[in-house]
Each structure stands twice: as C-alpha cells, then as structure tokens.
Amino acid sequence: MSKKTYATAIRDVIAEEMRRDENVFVMGEDIEILGGIFGCTRDLYKEFGVDRIRNTPISEAAMIGAGVGSACAGMRPIVELMYMDFTLVAADQIINQAAKTRYIFGGKAKIPLVIRGQQGIGRGNAATHSQSLETIFMHFPGIKVACPSNAADAAGLLRTAIRDDNPVMFFEHKALYASKFEVPDDPDFCVPFGKADIKRAGKDVTIVGSLLYVSRALEAAAELEKIGIDAEVIDPRTLVPFDTQTIIESVKKTGKLVVVHEAHKVAGWGAEVVSQVVEGAFKYLDAAPIHLGAKACPLPFNIELENAVVPSVEQIVEAAKKVCNKK
Amino acid sequence: MISKERKFWIYETMNKIRYFELKALKLFEENKLRGSVHLYAGEEAVAAGVCSQLRDEDYITSTHRGHGHCIAKGAELDKAMAELMGKVTGYCKGRSGSMHIADFTKGNLGANAIVGGGIPIATGAALAAKLQKTDKVAVSFFGDGASNEGTFHESLNLASVWKLPIIFVCENNGFGISVPVSQSTSVENISDRAVGYGMPGVTVDGNDVFAVYEAFEEALKRAKAGDGPTLIECKTYRTLGHWTGDPQTYRDKKVVEMWRDTKDPIQLFKKRLVEAGDFTEEELDKVEEDAKIEADAAAEFAINSPNPDPSDVMDDVFYEC
Ligand SMILES: Cc1ncc(C[n+]2csc(CCOP(=O)(O)OP(=O)(O)O)c2C)c(N)n1
Ligand SMILES: [Mg+2]
C-alpha cells in the first residue's frame, strides 16, 4: 500500500497501463508540459513522448471522435477532458457515436475508449464548469460510467476502465484531487465494475452517495451516530453497470433509504436508485425513501449560493432522521 | 483618421481595462477574489480599437478572458468588480463571476466560459439585425484556440452564406493555455481560414491601436453595406499567466518580458499620441492616474457590497410570464 492523492493515483495507473500496453495513449488539452490542469498526466510526456501523451487543439468533438475511431482501429485511447462539462460540446460523438457504434454495426466494433476528466463544485467555476453530468451518460445504453470517491477506487476503477473493451466515461471530482488514501501497489489492482462498496456498515438506515458525497455521507453518519442512528453508507462506484443488489440487501436490513448526489435532483440517478429499491424491496421499506440532489437551477459562482444549491451534510442528517422517524 | 475625441476615449478605455485587471489580480493574490480569472492586460488595443466604433445597440459576444471587452462595451467598473467578487451588486447578481459578465442594455451578450461558445450567438444577433432591417452589427471576440472549435467553422460558413452583418475578431495571443498556436493550428495566419468561408480575412498587429482600428473600420463598412462578414486576426501576446496563478513553465520568460517591455499597446499608443501632438504627456498621465483611482474605487465598492441572499438562488431560471 502507498498513501497517494487521488490525482497521483490516476497518473500512476495511466503510466503503468501505458507501460503494459503500447496501444494505450492519452490525448487532451494541455496534458504535455502542463501535465493537465490538475496534474493527472504530469511529466508523463517525458517517459512516453508526445506521440502517446498528445496535446490536442481545443476541439472536443474531434478529440472524442478521434478516440472512437482510433479505438475501432485497434488503439486504446484515453481522452482527457479538462472539465467534464465539455462532454456537452462533444455530445454527438459520445452519445450517438461511441455509445451506439458496436450495437448498430451488429456487434462488429470494439471500442476500448476511456473519456475522463473532473467535474463538480468547490472552485467557484460557475454554471458551465461546475456541473455534475454522470446521470446523463447513465441514460444512454452503450457507455459504462465510473465515479471514484477516493484514490484507491480511482486507481482500481481506472485500470478496469482502460482494460475494458467498451467506452467508459470516467468522472473524477475536482474537490477530491488533493485527498489522500491508501492505494494497493499491485500493478494489476482492479476494482470490478458493478460492485458497490460499503464504506461504512450500519443497521438503521442506508445512505447511498458517490464522488464528493461519499465523504459527506460519512460525515453525516458520524453525526447520526451521536444521536444513536447507525447508518450504512454505500458507494455504487459505477453507475453503469449498477449494483442494485448490494443496495437492496442493505435496505432489507435497515428498512430505510436516503440517496444523495451533487447532480440535479430532478431525474438524477438517485431517482433511479429509489425506483429500483421500490420495485425490488418495497415490502422491506419502513418509510418512503428520500432522494437529495442539487436544486433545479444552474450552479452559481458565489460560494454561499453554490453551497445553497447542493445538498449539505445537515440535509443528509435531517433526511436520515426523517426516514428513521427520529426528531 | 481617428478623431481626437475618439483617440482619447480609446486611451482612457485601455487604461481603465489595464488598471481594472491589475486590481483584480491583486485582489486574487490577497484571497479576496476566487474562481477562474483570466486577465486581458496587454491585449487592450483590440477591445478598445474595435468597441470605439460600436454603438450601444451593436452586439458583442466575449470570452473567458472577457473583462476588457465588457469594459470597452460600456461596463461600469463597480458592477464588473462586484461580479468578480460574487456580490449581489455585480452585473449578474454574483451568480457568474469573472467568466460570464453580460450587460444586455449595452449590447454585451456576454462573456462565455465555453471556448467558442459565443461565436454562433453573435452570428444569431447579426441574423436578428438583418431580419429586423436595422443597421446594427455584431462582433464576436474569440481566441486563437477557439478557432479550432467546430462552432467557429460552422458560424463563419453560416454568416457568409447568409451575408450577415458580423465581424469575427480573433485575438491571437500566441497560446491556448500552455499550447502554442503553432502546435494546435493548421495555418500560419488564422485569417487564412476566411478563404474557406468566402469572406475577407486580414491579419493585423493587435498591439497597434491604429492597425486594429483601420481593419475594423473597413470590416464595419462591409457589414453595414450588406456585403457580409469579415475575419480579422489581431496578433497580440498574453503577457500574464493564462489564469491568475498559472506557473507558466511552458514558455520562455525572455519572450514574455520582450512583449511586456517593448510592445505594450498602451505605451505604444501613448507615444504615437504625444508624437502627433494630439495630447501632452501630462494629459495622458492624468488619464492613467484617474483609471487607477477608478479601479481602486471599484474594488472598494465590491468589497463593501453584500453577498447575494441564498434564498433567491432559484430566481431567474425561467422568465416569469
Ligand atoms: C469548450 C471548452 N474547452 C476547453 C476549455 C478550457 N479552456 C479555457 S480557456 C482555454 C484556452 C483558450 O485559448 P484561446 O481561445 O486562445 O483564448 P486565450 O485564453 O488565449 O485568450 C481553454 C482550453 C473551455 N473553457 N471550453
Ligand atoms: Mg490564445
């Protein structure tokens, strides 16, 4: 084990996978000398050269499309987007092309493509640079979606993503890059897709969250413990494939469910979790599940406003108390 | 020929921009201002040279490096600085910060944090001007980097086939963040791209007010005559970091110093004005002093302004009918 930041864990896995397989390469804006604005490719051009750590023009549609095409032709591209908000500039290449190519060609194409980058609140980047977009990509069949909440998951999920023969959207969180965690040194350490992780075991209420909201749910759990509520915190880790089973097993035990995410609440992935739990474990529920997410307005710049739009630890605590029928 | 009055306006505007930017940088360094702040200092000749020929009813779209365009299009420094600090007295009620300042009353359709995001919007404003049979024009400011986005190419083609009254003003400042233009861009001069879209393309020294002014004057005539768009490339240089806090390890300090010390657009313009006998050195120094005072006052105003009330955060998502 080595204690590493989330950003270093990502960089190390990219380097290890590039050493292991010469078809793996990275393209993105400012990833050479600058090493990406969050340092996820820092100094890698020195070892791998600028053919494999490739600066692109500011042309997201072409970057993603070139990822799809080079993957179809035998490479294993990693496309770094500086902000995952820019997926929207390249939406056709992701949703109409990457996600559908294999299926519409009758299973002929193989697209080992990773699209990775950061999203979310925390740096005052305002409406077009602070969104949480993982839900959108969960909606369209054909792309896998990973959301690591700590450095170890980032390493294990990224390795799985790079070795996967399907397009994977890999959502990092800008506020997590500096956070440290013990990461296994095994160069084959993989976290399987579709396997949720119980970040804290508990018996009274199930709290499901991902990315930044794992640490916030854990903070809420610590608060709840003080008033005698024992919360179980589950991180799905991948939204596609989604591990409904682990959540259902937990709800069978606790009878209560709170789902929280930074993405907008309306039609956010938490609604899907609630729907699946209601379908699969209705009779085990002691209370109506609560789903928390960002308010239905764009992310504002001012820090107080930004905090007012996304769920707070306090709101998670309140929601858990409510489903537990505790004042 | 630029009238004396207009020369004064340009000089004043350039100084306002310069000292606004330097003040913003200072506030950022003092941790009084946060977020992504991209400064325009050193590129003032473009915004001032262009906007000196626009009226309030003409439109512009701007970029992530937008303070200069906004000020040149009539933004008040107080409200602009307050927006940078996220205050309720700011242009966008503190919701937008540095990258999205807009003032529709002055024809400023907004700075835009998405690179290339404003180019089609300016094109649409030009379409409206044409459909409404006005003599309004639209100007889209954007960087060299933005000229590699699809929106640039689609907009130029569309504006050309529809003969829209728009001028595309590319600020080629040598870099898109750390990437030099030569590494990202297929042509030596970005104005060469105009050929592919059937419109005139010109490259001018973007640090020379007169060169920018004359190229734009010509393009404006064309737009108003119904002859369609022009692409103007203004070659300039970003002497500060891409954003406040940029380590700038990707470039040679000497080149930066050369541009800063010998090609400063304000100093070059000042020299020309004094040499031509338009103004005395003292008169121009006074303009500079006043700009400093105005920037300081804007900072005071912003610092003393209240934060927005979080309970209003859901307002303005939709127009209330
Ligand atoms: C669609 C999109 N891609 C990438 C970015 C990140 N980004 C912000 S500014 C910038 C460089 C822009 O370069 P240029 O257009 O030359 O403008 P300059 O900053 O040099 O003024 C980049 C890549 C963005 N904001 N939007
Ligand atoms: Mg540039």
Image (cartoon, rainbow, N blue to C red):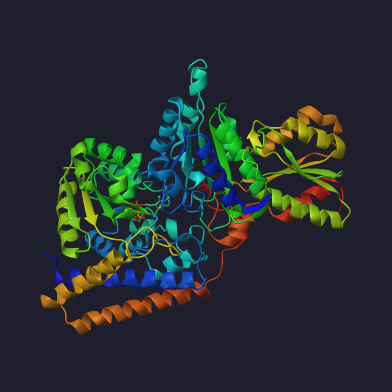
Q: Residue A325: x, y in percent?
A: 87, 47
Which residue occupies 48% across, 43% down? A80
Q: Residue furthest top?
A: A106
- Residue A270 percent across, percent down from the top left: 68, 39
| Foreground of the two, B187 or A164 | A164
Residue A132 visible in the current orientation = no
Q: Which residue lies furthest to the bottom in this view?
A: B282
Percent from the top left, x then y, of residue B267? 22, 73
Q: Nearer the viewer, residue B95 or A281?
A: A281
Res A324 visible: yes
Q: In the picture provided, is B35 more to the left or to the right than A309? A: left
Give A273 or A150, whichever is nearer the viewer: A150
Q: At x 71% / y 34%, what residue is drawn?
A: A195
Identify which residue, B77 or B103, lies in the foreground.
B77
Which quarter of the figure is the N terminus of chain B placed in? bottom left
Image side of residue B241 versus residue B8, left or right: right
Q: Judge whether B73 appears above or below A321 on screen.
A: below
Instruction: For ligand 2, give the image quadrant.
Output: bottom left
Q: Quadrant of residue B18?
A: bottom left
- Count of numbered tags: 0
In the rendered image, residue B188, in percent from the top left (x then y), is placed at 21, 47
